[in-house]
Amino acid sequence: MPRWRALRSRLTRDIAVDLGTATTLVHVRGRGIVVREPSVVALDRVTGQVLAVGEQAKEMLGRTPPNIEAIRPLKDGVIADFDVAEQMLRHFIHRVHQRRAFAQPAVVIGIPSGVTEVERRAVRDATLRAGAREALLIAEPMAAAIGAGLPVSSARGSMVVDIGGGTSEVAVIALNGVVAGRSVRVAGDEVDEAIVNYMHYEFDLAIGIRTAERIKLAIGSAYPLDEEERVTIARGRDLVSGLPKSVEVSESQIREGIVQPLRGIVEAIRATLEETPAELSADVMDQGIVLTGGGALLRGLDRMIAEEVQMPVRAAEDPVSCVVIGAGRALEQIEQLADAFEPF
């Protein structure tokens, strides 16, 4: 790196971004993760002015008056609203650099491996328009594997399953490249929607996505566990009377309700294993599968997948942060990991 470029890099604090459907994380060179906020923006419908970003905006979801709109600018891991995504990125970049107008960092940003060229360009353009001097893209499973500490530069194969909000990324990685993989738009959001639908049909209860997420975090599981079954109270609107209603729901009921999206993730893992060369399959069998992303926190998911594919499965130490940590390491080791970045 030329001396002037290295100096400018230190001054502007280059950053890595995990631009997730549910959550955006920002990693700053030398400082670690400095932003962990919901990917939500609240706008004034009339003026288009940004009223809130992140946690404050998420609190407004489903609660806004007619003149305010709370928007999630990403859907299924890709940008659905370009202008709002740009404003959200600009907000986070300025926040990291304490709103210094001259700061123009290089930005490494994680993207799903299955995106189209148009979707890839949209992420890059939004990042540049948000104030980055340079935008580098890295596939999320590659970044997740680096962040989980897997030997991605080795000839030995490693398998990572990154379960985010909008997409699940399955990849077998060796020599800084994805040898076999699948990107499916079945992940945390679909699990939440499955809970909404289950409550609808089993209890005649209408609940919102935020309530479904709360239930998932409280008693969600993918596999019967040894401890005593837990229950929680779900509150919503009775679909028959239209009045507020509360019901008690159990762990086994929620497990039944979310089985379909979890099967979709397992099928993506099976399909990837079927495409994996025999030598790398042996490596994966020895080392096992590593789960990353927020979905890896679903209790019993490792045991469910291990039973389905008959090989060891474990969650990474900090699964939620793996993508942004890996993107940050790729930025710091850009020469050694040059092959890991996505070409334009």
Image (cartoon, rainbow, N blue to C red):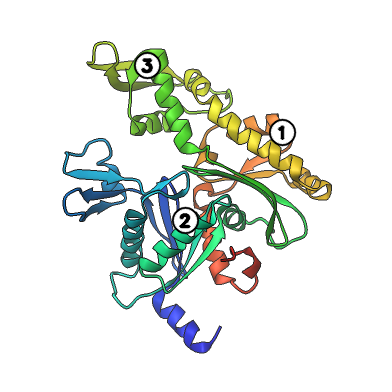
**Image coords of residue 195 (percent x, y):** 43, 25
In the rendered view, would you say 273 is above or below 176?
Answer: above
Q: Which mark is residue 248?
A: 3
Front disc: 3 or 1: 1
Q: Is 157 situated left or right of 182 in this image? A: right
**Residue at which label 2 appears:** 18
Q: Quadrant of residue 341?
A: bottom right
Residue located farthest toward the front when viewing the structure as drawn: 118
Q: Quadrant of residue 184?
A: top right
What is the secondary structure assignment of the residue under circle 1?
helix
Front disc: 3 or 2: 2
Q: Which mark is residue 116?
A: none
Q: Does label 2 or label 1 sit earlier along the sequence?
A: 2
Q: Find out whether the residues at labels 2 and 1 contact each other: C-beta distance under 8 Å.
A: no
- How packed is label 1: few (under 14 Cα within 10 Å), some, or many (20 or more)? some
Query: Which residue is pictured at 17% across the width and 39% down the height?
Result: 66
Query: Which residue is pictured at 56% across the width and 83% down the height?
Result: 1
**Residue at which label 1 appears:** 309
Q: Does label 3 or label 1 sit earlier along the sequence?
A: 3
What is the secondary structure assignment of the residue under circle 2?
strand
Q: Amino acid at mark 1?
A: Val
